[in-house]
Image (spheres, grey):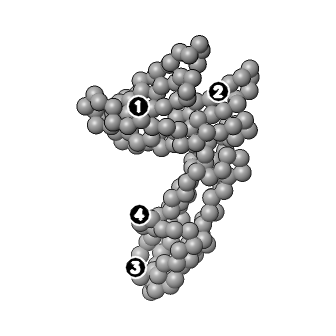
Amino acid sequence: TDENQTYTANLKGEGYGTFTFKDSIIDGDQVVQTQVFINVLVSPSFTGKVLLDSAGTTIISDTDGDGVADTTINPNTTLFKEESEDIIPPAIALPAIPEEVVLNSRLTLNFDATDDLSGVYYVKAMLDGIAVSKNETINMTQVGSHIFHLETTDRAGNSAEQELKFNVVY
């Protein structure tokens, strides 16, 4: 911001999904701080404004398209110096699940995500579309194909995802 000015950028949704928005404070040629808005929900009816001023950055959203602001969104994370330069997604470690698993076997879902620079913001794991927890033990009672899916985002907004397919057999 310059001389206590407020800058505005208008937002308009064109589909369903999420977006990540970053803004940085730069001193000379150095980034000194970055604010990150991670996975902001958007739909075709979404409109909003990004407001940048001396107090920081906020997103004002109208999620239902009625012309009335519904939510003020603050940054999920604030990064300083080296963290602001993080462009590498978190590393993912999937559980060791063989291609074929015998019916009624118990699987322990040992998975992880790490990020050495800005740190992990969140990890979401799903088995066949159902949320599961790290180190959770599952009894495999359904014959057929299965999918373990892991997604993660670091505090800088970099994302990674992987999936592992396997079959449960008699």
Of badges 4 and 1, nearer the viewer stands 1
Label 3 with label 4: CB-CB less than 8 Å: no
The residues tagged by marks 4 and 1 sit, at their Cα atoms, a distance apart of 31 Å
The residues tagged by marks 2 and 1 sit, at their Cα atoms, a distance apart of 20 Å
Label 4 with label 1: CB-CB less than 8 Å: no
Residue appearing at x 66%, y 32% in the figure: 33
- Looking at the image, residue 49 lies above or below residue 84: above
Give the label on residue 123, or none.
none
Q: Badge 1, how many Cα within 10 Å: few under 14, some, many 20+?
A: many
Task: Name the residue that disc number 2 marks.
Answer: 25
Q: Badge 2, how many Cα within 10 Å: few under 14, some, many 20+?
A: some
Of badges 2 and 3, nearer the viewer stands 2
Disc 4 marks a residue whose amino acid type is Gly
| Left or right of 43 on screen, residue 26 | right
- Looking at the image, residue 161 lies above or below residue 100: above
| Left or right of 118 on screen, residue 22 | left
Task: Name the residue that disc number 3 marks.
Answer: 142
Task: Name the residue that disc number 1 marks.
Answer: 60
Q: Which SS class for mark 4?
A: loop
Q: Which SS class for mark 1?
A: strand
Of badges 3 and 4, nearer the viewer stands 4
Task: Name the residue that disc number 4 marks.
Answer: 129
Disc 1 marks a residue whose amino acid type is Ile
x and y, in percent, of residue 6 in the image: 50, 18
Disc 2 marks a residue whose amino acid type is Ile
